[in-house]
Amino acid sequence: MPDIALYQPDIPQNTGTILRLAACLGITVHLIEPAGFPISDSALKRAGMDYLERAAMIRHTSFAAFEAWCREQDRRLILLTTKSAGPYTDFSFRADDILLMGRESSGVPEGVHQRADARLTIPMAEGMRSINVAVCAGMVLGEALRQTARFPKNLK
C-alpha cells in the first residue's frame, strides 16, 4: 500500500487532514520530526476530527531515522515538489511507494531532494506557486491508489 510521509510539518491542521485521509483510505502516515507544532491529539484533532484514532501514524525522530527505515523496508521514496519538471500524471507508481510531502513553509532541503528516488510535481496554471500540501497529498495518493488498484474495496 502506498504511504505518505510528512517532512517536518508546520501546520497541524494540514497534518490532521492528511491523517483523516489516511484513515479513510487505509494507508499509513510517516511523520518525520521535528514538527513545527507539538504532536498531540489536541493539536491535530480539529482537522482530523474523530478519525485520528483510526489513522495509522509512525513517528520518525529525524530524516536519517526515516531514511534508514526506508532502506530496511526497501521502499521507494517519491518526493512531491514544485522543483521538478516531471508531472505525477506521467509517473508509474508502485504499491509500496512512499509519497514524501515537504514542509509547508520551505519544502525539503537539497539533501532530501537528492535522496528521493523520483521527484514529481502537480502541473499548475502559469504564475501560481503551490497547492496546499493536504490537497496535493490527496491528488497524488488518489492516482497512486488508482494505478496500483489499492483503493479500499468496501464501497457502499
Image (tube, rainbow, N blue to C red):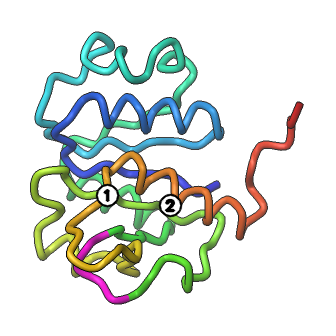
Q: Is residue 52 above or below residue 150?
A: above
Residue stretch in magenta: 81-85
The label number, if any, that marks residue 131 in the structure image: 1
Q: Earlier in the sequence, mark 1 or mark 2?
A: 2
- Please name the amino acid that badge 2 sits on: Gln
Mark on residue 73?
Answer: 2
For the residues marked 1 and 2, what is the alpha-carbon distance in whole angstroms?
30 Å
Judged from the image, the secondary structure of the residue bearing numbered disc 2 is helix
Which of these two is toward me, 70 or 86? Answer: 86
Picture coordinates of residue 65 (x, y %)?
25, 52
Q: Quadrant of residue 155?
A: top right
Q: Is residue 96 magenta?
A: no
Left or right: 11, with 25 as reference point: left
Image spot of residue 142 (x, y percent): 61, 57
87 shown above or below 29: below
- Residue 111's x, y, as percent? 14, 74
Instruction: Find residue 95 and report its image quarter.
Output: bottom right
Provide the major secondary structure of the magenta segment. Answer: loop
Q: Which amino acid does the dot numbered 1 rest on? A: Ile
Quadrant of the frame with the N terminus: bottom right
Within 10 Å of disc 1 (Cα), the crowding (few <14, some 14-19, many 20+) is: few
Query: Going 29% across and 29% down the picture, which residue do you hit?
Result: 13
Other-residue count near label 2 (Cα within 10 Å), few / some / many at <14 / 14–19 / ≥20: few
User: Residue at point 50% right, 61% down?
Assistant: 73
Q: Is residue 104 above or below residue 40?
A: below
In front of the other: 117 or 108: 108
